[in-house]
Amino acid sequence: MCWKFGQPMLNAYLIGVICIMPALVGTALGKRLGDRLNRKKLKALAFILLLISSLVALLVPLVHNGQ
């Protein structure tokens, strides 16, 4: 693939290799946390994390728009 597509393909591959460990660690932590919390608390935590993620996705372009 690298011979056919060149440097952009290699960059994408390296990013994937670098990001796999944090993804696996996050999955393991999420599974442990999910086992320890009851359903109501887990649902509230997931909602809060989704809300924070949504706000960041909306506000970052607005903040960086002036630059």
Image (spheres, rainbow, N blue to C red):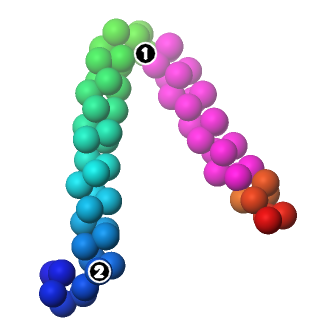
Residue at the right extreme, as displayed: 66
Q: Which residues are magenta?
A: 40-60
Horizontal side of 47 relative to 28 (left or right) equals right
Residue shown at 25%/73% (left/top)?
Answer: 10
**Does the stretch in magenta take in 22?**
no
**Does the stretch in magenta take in 41?**
yes
Place of residue 56 in the rendered image (x, y in percent of width and height, measured from the top left) = 66, 45
Q: Quadrant of residue 9?
A: bottom left
- Whether residue 21 is situated above or below residue 12 in the rendered picture: above
Residue at the bottom extreme, as displayed: 4
Mark positioned earlier in the residue sequence (2 or 1): 2
Place of residue 13 in the rendered image (x, y in percent of width and height, measured from the top left) = 25, 66
Numbered tag placed on residue 52 in the rendering: none
Magenta stretch: dominant SS?
helix
Q: Nearer the viewer, mark 2 or mark 1?
A: 2
- Judge the density around disc 2: few (<14), some (14-19), many (≥20) Cα neighbours within 10 Å: few
* Residue identified by numbered label 1: 39
- Camera-nearest residue between 4 and 51: 4
Numbered tag placed on residue 7 in the rendering: 2
Place of residue 45 in the rendered image (x, y in percent of width and height, measured from the top left) = 53, 22
- Camera-nearest residue between 59 and 1: 1
Q: Secondary structure at mark 1?
A: helix
Residue shown at 34%/26% (left/top)?
Answer: 30
- Say if residue 27 shows up in the picture: no
Horizontal side of 2 relative to 56 (left or right) equals left
- Camera-nearest residue between 31 and 4: 4
Amino acid carrying label 1: it is: Arg
